[in-house]
Amino acid sequence: MEHWSGIGKIQWRHIGGGPDCPWANNSLRLSPRQRSVTMKINKPRHPIAVIGSGIAGLAAANTLRDLQVPCVLVERFGRPGGRMNTRPGDGWTADHGTRYIRRSDQTLAALIRSIGYEQRRVSVQGGVHRLLANGTIEVPPHGGLDLDRMCLDLGFNVLTAGLAHGIPAIFDAPVAAIRWDNSANAFWWEEGQVFWFEDDKGEPIRDRTTREVLKASGVILATTGTAARAIAENSPALHDLVPALSAVKYDSCYAAIFKIPRQQPPFYALEGAPGARIAWLAFEDAKAPERAAPEYSVVVVQASAAWSAELMAKSDAEAMEAVYTEARAVLSFLPESPISQTYKRWNVSQLVSAPIGLPDRWPVNPESAPFSLAGDYVLGPRAEDAARSGVVAARQVVAQLPARRSFLGLELGA
């Protein structure tokens, strides 16, 4: 796939979704994208840079592609998805970021439909019961069953890999700042790590010490609010965004995954009430028929914010032992010890501040620069809210594209 950039004609080698991509599920069979473009847009000279490849960034990138506007994803980690994360194991699958999505949400439904994944949608089979602070379990009406809860048969990484498929992307490229160069009338994108570029002959055209410029006609900052604030603090062009972004607050979360002998609980998950140590406990093998295993169950346990703060100070072994002990205190039928276990420390997890909203134009300098923010802190904390913010941000940036040329780029940190 070739794109025109500030350094000429290049080929993106490390891109989303191909069979050689290290994070792609090789069992995926991607259906052709179907889209109907009815809006006429003046195409920018350079791609729109979407910083962050969580569900907000992927929704923004796919919206730009549907509008036939070139874009490039920039991701600090080695794979897309962000907190819409699935942990695969030895014959098991566990969603330990986003718990489920809503079938009734039109934004995610359109994204799933656009990549031909309607048949991968599965209603969550069991109900969600309530775990009270005193350790007792409260059964809601109808056993807590809600057919609007939905997951993907093989995990949410199937969705994020499908949405990233074919979109030019640069991974392992942390963004430190966006710098305005007045003499060039442009923002400059400066690399801090090796980029995966090749020339027409397949030869690398950059190394770790080269400083080249990749120009972009607009920027969508689709990171967490914490990362967005750090970038704004280091970027004179975004300083006016700092007060709003400083108000964005998250709780941390410690999550553990346990493989145990097969269990058949009368629920899919427990949701902790205020004061409970466990915020969420789910039997992932009971989530969808495709995940059921004949000999064992997979249990995901997410600690409350207050308890997570304590667990973060412990060693991994101590923290996992404490979480499993608490789970056994709630569910006495759990075995004395798990078959295997793993963990995830989320330093930025649940949004606890109010969403900052999405104005018609963000305060950036220069005002003419097409720019927008997207993420769980913009319109709301759910995955559906983040996806919607990405769609709106993409349309906003496209609407801001001026008739005259205005170039954006990024400075990447080490």
Image: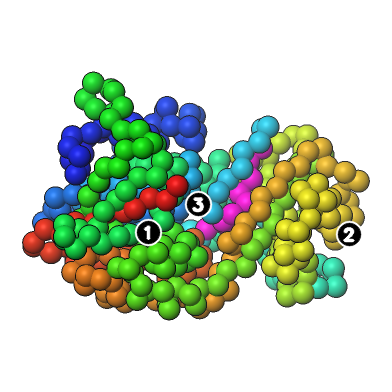
Does residue 131 appear left or right of residue 65 in this picture?
Answer: right
Disc 2 residue crowd, few under 14, some 14–19, many 20+, Cα 10 Å: few
Residue 323 spot, x, y in % from top left: 80, 55
According to the image, label 3 marks what residue?
A: 82
Residue 335 spot, x, y in % from top left: 88, 45
Q: Which mark is residue 177?
A: 1
Check disc 3 and give the amino acid type.
Gly
According to the image, label 2 marks what residue?
A: 329
Instruction: Please check the rendered image and state whether residue 93 is part of the magenta-colored stretch, yes or no.
Output: yes
| Pick the front one: 393 or 285 | 393
Q: Disc 2 or 1, which lies upstream in sequence?
A: 1
Q: Which residues are magenta?
A: 92-101
Residue furthest top in the image = 201
Disc 1 residue crowd, few under 14, some 14–19, many 20+, Cα 10 Å: many
Identify the element where label 2 is drawn.
helix
Identify the element where label 3 is drawn.
loop
Colouring chosen for the image of the structure:
rainbow
Identify the element where label 1 is drawn.
strand
Residue 285 spot, x, y in % from top left: 68, 44
Q: Are marks 2 and 1 in contact (CB under 8 Å)?
A: no
| Residue at left offset 66%, top offset 53% | 345
The residues tagged by marks 2 and 3 sit, at their Cα atoms, a distance apart of 32 Å
